[in-house]
Amino acid sequence: KNEVEQSPQNLTAQEGEFITINCSYSVGISALHWLQQHPGGGIVSLFMLSSGKKKHGRLIATINIQEKHSSLHITASHPRDSAVYICAVVRTSGSRLTFGEGTQLTVNP
Amino acid sequence: NAGVTQTPKFQVLKTGQSMTLQCAQDMNHEYMSWYRQDPGMGLRLIHYSVGAGITDQGEVPNGYNVSRSTTEDFPLRLLSAAPSQTSVYFCATRKPGSSQETQYFGPGTRLLVL
């Protein structure tokens, strides 16, 4: 079993829909990252959070440390949100990142 | 400010050939790392460096060498390429200090080993 699990693996939505991507982890962490990988391959950091909730535009990320779970929400989804969304955790033992496999999101017009 | 640059963007090698993947950053970040990305798997750490002259192994270091002679550059060397090294390679950097800092990724290098 992977230490970082994302669900769903693939998600197709219609433009305007509210989207949720989940990340569960089984190790102790000090922080969690959400990353976005565009179809061209580039990876950008969306959020880094260690507790609570962060919001940036239409994106909201939450984390529950006790339940070892984080969610990424996209409100009013748009075709330009189509990408792979990756969850990565920073272990408390050391500073390396452990990545989930990613969630492929496709938003249709 | 170019951020993190990687060259080449795409490379085809024959089994047994050697090559160097280049990574450069202009953000004065001390921490640099190399990842590989394979279908159905998350990014995996190959090697990393916490500063010039200091390198260490990640999860999947076999078949790869690194060096860090300057803060700006962190090349990844494949000594004798194997088909199992066909992958997309990403270089990443982050600010010094906390491991919770934002990671900055290069655009990636697609490597095909025949």
Image (cartoon, grey):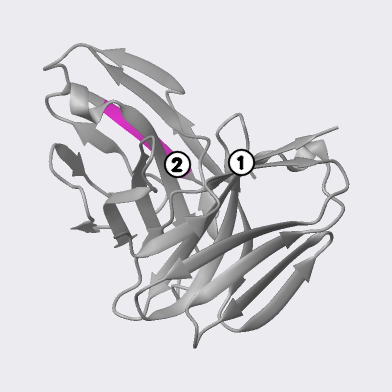
Q: Residue at x 51, y 37 (%)?
A: B5
Say if mark 1 contacts mark 2, CB within 8 Å: yes
Quadrant (top left, top right, bottom left, bottom right) of the N terminus of chain A: bottom left
Q: Answer yes or no: is residue B30 visible.
A: no
Q: Amino acid at mark 2?
A: Ala
Whether the magenta-drawn stretch holds residue B58 is answered as: no
Q: Please, is residue B85 above or below residue A44 in the view?
A: above
For label 2, the residue is B24
Q: Residue at x 47, y 34 (%)?
A: B108
Rendered location of residue A26, percent (x, y): 36, 73
Q: What's the magenta region?
A: B20-24
In front: A65, or A57? A65
Q: Residue at x 38, y 48 (%)?
A: B43
Quadrant (top left, top right, bottom left, bottom right) of the C terminus of chain A: top right
Q: Residue at x 46, y 55 (%)?
A: B93
| Label 1 secondary element | loop
In front: A11, or A92? A11
By secondary structure, the bulk of the magenta-drawn segment is best described as: strand
Asked whether, in this view, residue A78 is left or right of residue B34, the answer is right
Q: Answer yes or no: is residue A18 visible.
A: yes
